[in-house]
Amino acid sequence: TQLLEQSPQFLSIQEGENLTVYCNSSSVFSSLQWYRQEPGEGPVLLVTVVTGGEVKKLKRLTFQFGDARKDSSLHITAAQPGDTGLYLCAGAHGSSNTGKLIFGQGTTLQVKP
Amino acid sequence: EPEVTQTPSHQVTQMGQEVILRCVPISNHLYFYWYRQILGQKVEFLVSFYNNEISEKSEIFDDQFSVERPDGSNFTLKIRSTKLEDSAMYFCASRFGTGDYGYTFGSGTRLTVV
């Protein structure tokens, strides 16, 4: 059974602080995606990383895919209250005609003003 | 920006009844998925659909579940005889291709079985 473990599950920080969320697995994934999910809504894609060692930046968010494609991290610099939400990592695995996603359990981030 | 549209947003049904959840994927997308999320739990894969057939399904997707793409635009999930444990948010997703093509998720249908 493929599992993705996210840590921490909950994070409460002050505005302006930096934070890192981790996503780890014993399985290799063909790609890994990060989503943000608001209450009562579907996940919204932030980024996809495909190549081992890849780093992608989205404004204050930096995403990294591990060299072995088993783990990933999301780093937020100078967090703002608008960053508050649920962050999900999801690994893609399977044949080219499925690409099903295995989701982590999520990290709930609260940024206090 | 193109969206995946799901209807209804909330469905309440009695145990044993059939329900059909509807989705309109993005028009030029080729791969379609259903996921579900039981309250407080992970998002779980149910089924993937490509080239008018199921390409993969999970253990959850038993004989009570079926999917259809009847008219080239709608993508439906049918649960024949609902159980209490089917209560969850059901998300439809689509994407244009495999590899690093991103998924677009709908806003979900909250199914409550009473």
Image (spheres, rainbow, N blue to C red):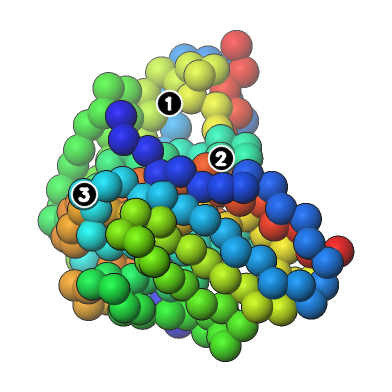
Outermost residue to the bottom: B63
Cα gap from disc 1 to disc 2, whole angstroms: 26 Å
Tell me which chain the residue with mark 2 is part of.
A
Q: Is residue A101 left or right of residue B81?
A: left
Amino acid tagged 2: Glu
| Mark 1, residue position | A18
Badge 3 amino acid: Asn
Q: Please report the residue visible at 38 percent of the width from the left and 29 percent of the height from the top.
A: A76
Q: Residues within 10 Å of mark 1 (few under 14, many from 20)?
A: some
The residue located at (51%, 77%) in the rendering is B66
Please name the residue that numbered disc 2 is placed on: A41
**Sequence-earlier tag: 1 or 2:** 1
Q: Secondary structure at mark 3?
A: loop
Q: Which residue is mark 3?
A: B28
SS for callout 2: loop
Is the residue A94 above or below the residue A21 in the image? below
Question: How far apart are the alpha carbons under marks 3 and 2?
Answer: 23 Å
- Is disc 1 in the same subunit as disc 2? yes
